[in-house]
Amino acid sequence: MQTSDEIKKIVKEKYGKIAQQSDKRKDECCCGSGKSEKEISCCGSDKTDYSVFSDDYSQLEGYAADADLGLGCGLPTEHAGIRTGDTVLDLGSGAGNDAFVARALVGESGKVIGVDMTDEMIVRAEKNKVKLGYANVEFHYGEIEDIPVDNATVDVVISNCVLNLVPDKNRAFQEIHRVLKLGAHFCISDVVYQGQMSAKMLQSAELYAGCVAGAMEENKYLDTIRK
């Protein structure tokens, strides 16, 4: 069984490579859906289709194509009750996809903070922010188990297909609780499973990077949140 640090290292490497790919390379290689095994093999041994759960963002206000790497598994901003003037925290913000949609909802008077543990994603998100000219969006390097945000300063926490990648989910939800204001809330899209998962899958860091092995059983996931 891989340690927490080993899992994080593999996740960072996988998502770092994705962040560095151009859109053309992404479509031609391992991150694009509907590719044959021969086409996917150009990325080496990683044949994970990271876009398999991805929803269509293109009709949402604030959508930025350069920030959409096809890595989500839902549309948390559509269900998060984000209001004008809110401070929104996006955990695992990647290239900024959800953060920029959230920015359209909070407006000029609000603020959006993105946190990601992959350097390459932060670099790409910052480039996208500069291109869009947003002064009230910021991106920070950090881990969800130790969020670099002050206590009780956030109105809404969102996260899209990222909590499943976090080894210590108890700690992650403790941190979410810490940064939320009294009476504030979170909205998360994530991967869970029902029934049993084989020991081989649960121990695979490759599958962890692809969101499968890191997923929790649905009832255990909800119990973790309640605690």
Image (cartoon, rainbow, N blue to C red):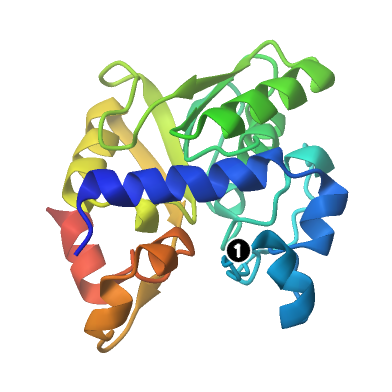
Quadrant of residue 146 within the rendered picture: top left
Image quarter of the N terminus: bottom left
Q: Please state if 87 lies on the left or on the right of 177 as rendered.
A: right
**Residue at 33%, 64% in the rendered image:** 214
For the point 22% across and 29% down, the residue is 178
Residue that mark 1 sits on: 50
10 Å crowding of disc 1: few (<14), some (14-19), many (20+): many
Q: Is mark 1 on a helix, strand or loop?
A: loop
Residue 155: x and y in percent read 42, 29
Residue in the image at 72% along x and 71% along y: 40
| Residue 106 in sight | yes
- What's the residue type where badge 1 is placed? Tyr
Q: Is residue 80 visible?
A: no
Q: Give the side of residue 4 with respect to residue 96, left or right.
A: left
Q: In the image, is residue 137 above or below residue 20?
A: above
- Indicate whether 170 appears above or below 210: above
What is the residue that sits farthest to the right in this orientation? 24
Image position of 215 with respect to 68: above or below = below
Residue nearest the viewer, comparing 113 with 106: 113
Look at the picture and state if 40 lies above or below 128: below
Residue at the left extreme?
227
* Foreground pick, 191 / 26: 26
